[in-house]
Amino acid sequence: MIKTLKGKISTVYIWLVLMIAIVGFTSVFSFHALSRAIDGLMVNNYKSISAINNMIEAIDGQNTAILNYLNNNDETGIDLFDKNSDRFYKWYNIEANNITELGEKDHISKINKDYDKYIMLFSNLQEIKNKQGTDKALDFYNNHIITLYNDLKNELKDLSSINERAMFGSKDKVTNDTILIMYVVLGLSLVAVIGGYFIATFFINKFLKPIYTLTESIKSVKEGELQKEISVATSDEIGLLAHEFNNMTKRLQQFEHSNKGKLLEEKNKSIAIVKSISDPLIVLDTDYKVVLLNNACEDVFRIKEEDALNKHFLEGIRNRELYEYISDVYKEDNEKISDKIMNLKVDEKDYYFNIVSTSIKDRDFKVYGIVVLLQNVTKLKQLEKIKTDFMGTISHELKTPLTSIMMGLSLITDKKIGDLNEKQETIVEAMREDGERLSSLISELLQLSKIQSDKAVFNIKQCSIIGIIENCIKRFNKQAISKEANLYFEADEKLPKVTIDPEKISWTLNNLVSNALKYINAGDEVFIKAVVKGNKMYVSVEDTGVGIPSEYQKIIFDKFVQVKGEDLEMRSSGIGLAIAKEIVEAHGGEIWCDSKLDVGSKFTFTIPI
Ligand code: ADP
C-alpha cells in the first residue's frame, strides 16, 4: 500500500509510461515480424522459380546435345549432354532443399524419376545408333525421348507456377497481416488513450477530493466555524495536513473559549461600571433604538431597561425634547461632543441635566451608535440660583442707600447747600463718577438676576430690526465721530419683521456696539449687519479693533469676565455680554464671537423668525 501522495502520483505515472511502452513495443515487434515475413516468403519462392528456370534451360541444352549427337557430332553431343546434366542436378538439389509450398514435394519426386528415365533413354539411343544406325536412333528419339522431354518441361513449368502463385499469395497475406497489425496497434493505442484518460481522471479526482474538502473546511473556519473538523481518511501528505489543520482549529477553539470567557467577564465589568454611573446614560444605535440604559436613567425616566431595549427612543424613553436634541447633534455633525442644559420634572421636582451626546465610531470612523450622558447639574443650578437671588437681594439692598448717596452728592455738586472749594469739588466729582459707575453696575446686576430668575418681563412685539439698528446708530454716532471711527450698517430693506422684546434686543445691540467702540482705535470701523438665512435672522457687530485672545472667546459671555491686561480705564463690570446672552437665549436664539487679535471682533446673535 502506497502511503505518500508523491508515491501515488509516481505509480499512476509509471502505469501510464508502461502502457505507452506496451503500445510501442507491440508496434515495433509487429512491424519487424511483418518485414521478416515479407522477406522470407518472397525470397524462398523466388529461389525456387530461379532454380526451375535453370533446370528447364539444362534440359533444353540436353535436347540440343541429343540433336547434335544424332547429327553425327557424337563427342560434342555427349559432352554437352553431361555438362547440362550436371547443371540440372545442381539446381535440382537447390529446389529439392527449398520446398515451401503444398504439392511441391510430389512434383519434385516425379521430376526426379522422369529425369532418371530421360538419362537412361539417352543411353538407349546411343546403343541403338551404334548397333542399328542413325535412322533407327532418330525414330527412337521421336517416339520416346521427345515425349519425355516435353513432359519434364511441363512438370517444371507446373512447379514454377506453384511458386509464382505462392509468391502472389504471400503478397496478399502480407497485405492482410499489415491491416491486422494496423488494427491491433490502433486498438492498443485507443485502449492506452482511453485507459490513460480514465486512470488519470480517476486518480486526479481521488487525490484532489481531500484537497477540496480541506479548502472548504478552511473557508468555514475563516468564517468563524471553529468547530469544523475535516474528515480526510488518507494517511498521505494531505491526510497529515488535515490532521494538523484539525489540531489547529482545536487550539483556536480553546483559545476562543478562554478569550470569550475573558471578554465576557470584561464586558460584564464594563456594563456594571456603566450601570453604576450615578448620571443617567443611554446608548442608542444609529436608528435611535435603545441598546443600553443604566440604573440612574431608569430612575430619572421611570422606566425599566428591559421594557425600553430595542425600542425606538421615543417609544422606550418617551422624551421628545431630548430626542430632538440628540438627533440634531447626530445629523448636524456627528463628530461633535455637544452639550445642553435640559430641565426635567420628576415627581414635581426640577432636575437639570447637562446633556453630552457623542457618536460612537469604529476603526474606519463609521458611526455605529450614540452615547448620551445626562450630567446631573441640578445642585449647581440650585447654587447658581442662590447666587443670583443673593446678587439680586444685595443689589436691591445697595440700590436704596446708593440712590440717597447719589442724591446727596448731586445736591452738593449742584452747590444747592453751599459753595465748595476747588479741592472739595474734585473729590466730590470723583465720588459722583464712582457712584454712577456703581449705580450702573447695580442696575446691570439687577437686570441680570431678574432675567435669570425668570422675573424679567418680556414685552414681545412684532417689529423691524432696521428701526432698532438705526436707533443704535443714532445713539452712538457722536461717540464714533469723537473716536474718529466709521460706524455704519447694512441690511436688506425687505427683511421680515421679528417677534422680540424691542427694548431688550436694543439693549443687546447697544451693548455690542458700545463694546466695539470701546475697543477700537482712531480710523477703525464698526459695521452692523442683519441678514436672513433659513429660518433665522443673523445680526452681527463687526469691528476692526484690538480683537480678543482665543482663550477668552468662549468664556467672554460668562459673568465678570474681562480680558486680562486691559486698560484699567476701559474696565467696567464684565456682565454686559452675560446679560446679552441671557436676553438672546430667552428669545430662542444664540450668540457667539469670532475674533482675531489686532484684526478685530465679530459678535453675532440670531433671532428665530
Ligand atoms: P463690559 O460690560 O465690562 O463691557 P462685557 O461683558 O460687555 O463687559 O465684555 C466683557 C469683556 O469682553 C470686555 O471687558 C472686553 O475685554 C471684551 N470685549 C467685549 N467686546 C469686545 C470687542 N468688541 N473688542 C474687544 N474686546 C471686547
Image: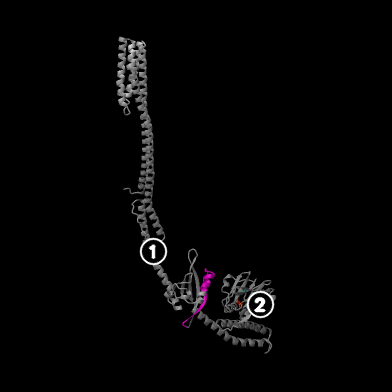
Taking the spot 35% from the left edge, 53% from the top edge, the residue there is: 239
Quadrant location of residue 193? top left
Q: Which element is circle 2 on?
A: helix
Horizontal and vertical percent position of residue 246: 36, 57
Q: Which element is circle 1 on?
A: helix
| Lateral position of residue 10 relative to residue 590, left or right | left
- Residue bearing mark 1: 259
Horizontal and vertical percent position of residue 31: 38, 35
The image quadrant where one finds the C terminus is: bottom right
Q: In the rendering, which numbered label is found on residue 384?
A: none
| Lateral position of residue 118 relative to residue 592, left or right | left
Q: Range of the magenta residues?
A: 325-347
Label 2 near ligand 1 (CB < 8 Å): no
Badge 2 amino acid: Ile
Quadrant location of residue 589? bottom right
| Residue 344 lies in the magenta-colored region | yes
Quadrant location of residue 469? bottom right
| Residue 355 lies in the magenta-colored region | no
Estimate how packed mark 1 is, as few (under 14), some (14 to 19) or many (20 or more) residues with alpha carbons within 10 Å.
few
